[in-house]
Image (cartoon, rainbow, N blue to C red):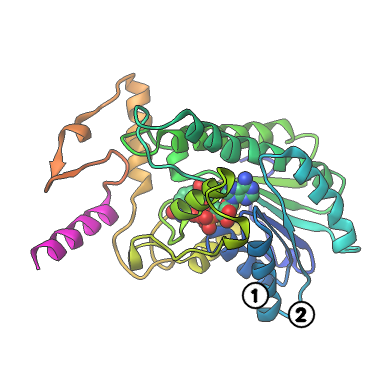
Amino acid sequence: MSVQQGAFDTAQLADQVAVVTGAGNNGIGWGICRHAAGQLKMHVLIIDLHENLVQSAVERLRAEFPAILVSGMRCDVTRPEDLQWAAKQVSARFPGKDIGAVFANAGVIFNKTIMKSSIEHWRTTLDVNIMGVLHTIQAFVPLLQAQSCESIFSTTASVGGLVRGDAGAASYQASKHAVVAMTESLSYELAVKSPQIRFHVLCPCIVGTALGETSRINRMVKTGDLDEAQVHVPQTQSIGDLAQTPDAHARQVFDHIAAGNFYMITENKRPYVDHDFPFDAEAIIQERMEGVLKMQLDNSDALNRNQGRQTSSILKGPLFQEVARRAANHSES
Ligand SMILES: NC(=O)c1ccc[n+]([C@@H]2O[C@H](COP(=O)([O-])OP(=O)(O)OC[C@H]3O[C@@H](n4cnc5c(N)ncnc54)[C@H](O)[C@@H]3O)[C@@H](O)[C@H]2O)c1
């Protein structure tokens, strides 16, 4: 066991600050904010890309939890100076409070194969998903190092950062593998110097969010095709009740933190979902690791087609079998 892991009493986070990037929509970051405020009595700093998203999230959280301090900052995580500025603002916005947890969570996805994706999709994905995490680390870890209390620093990768790539979003998976590698390195680098910081890498499976749509909206603002003032929180686009809700997902995140799990794989399993169709990350990760050790890449999943649908080497566990079964029933009726 690493010196930074082991059980952690999350009650000690009360009255401390949670900093969460990518929390302005109704996704994973927002669920973490609600859990931190509602269950742990933490104060919350919400960071996201657009002023109106940040302000509306701040207002919603303040209205729901009036006893805690909530602040928001518009930052582009691809700009190191934005995050350095945000880190400098924390002591003024939350006077006398320690930072209990930082979640480097902002991310984008563009579902394209390598041959069909543009250089710009790749650059944006690597910039937000990798460099954005790096900038958050470099801005906030020094604040945690300066504190004597224990604290949490969590990066958001994906289960996609632990399994092989397939015919989905190659740029996304490449970026998430990098987040896993960065977080492992950081944990090792600071194990002796700053053992009070507990590093974690969050590897969600399927959470009901609008990640694809928020990525599209953010890109439209960047290219000038959408006015920033028109940005709104989109509808969740995921697979209905088979996905975890952001609230249930946040419970699982803090259960992992309490258990001291470095790799926080948040599975679609009870009690965090109300069904028995798991993503089955364990089997899919094991398959990859066994292939690596045998020095073989098995592409047999690419050759199997299921009722006309392209199969995947990743999205193939009981959860996606159930998605396929429901889609087939729907098309028959
Ligand atoms: N939803 C899932 O099933 C799932 C699975 C695995 C990993 N993830 C990861 O979880 C994280 C949160 O995604 P989500 O699913 O909650 O979707 P989401 O769209 O709610 O969250 C992503 C947030 O990042 C923000 N963002 C994007 N670019 C930014 C930038 N340059 N600066 C600041 N903020 C920026 C977006 O505005 C958005 O609010 C992402 O890193 C994503 O890759 C999600």
The residue lying at 43 percent from left, 41 percent from top is 160
Of tags 2 and 1, the one toward the viewer is 1
| Magenta-highlighted residues | 317-333
Q: Is residue 268 left or right of residue 174?
A: left
Calculate the distance from the C-alpha at mark 2 to the C-alpha at mark 1.
13 Å
**The C terminus lies in which quarter of the figure?**
bottom left
Front-most of residues 308 and 247: 308
Looking at the image, is mark 2 or mark 1 earlier in the sequence?
Answer: 1
Check residue 60 in the rendering and tell me which mark sits there, or answer none: 1
- Residue under label 2, please give it: 67
Residue projecting furthest to the top = 295
Is residue 318 inside the magenta stretch? yes
The residue lying at 80 percent from left, 35 percent from top is 193
The quadrant in which residue 41 appears is bottom right
Amino acid type at image mark 2 = Ala
Q: Is residue 308 left or right of residue 138?
A: left
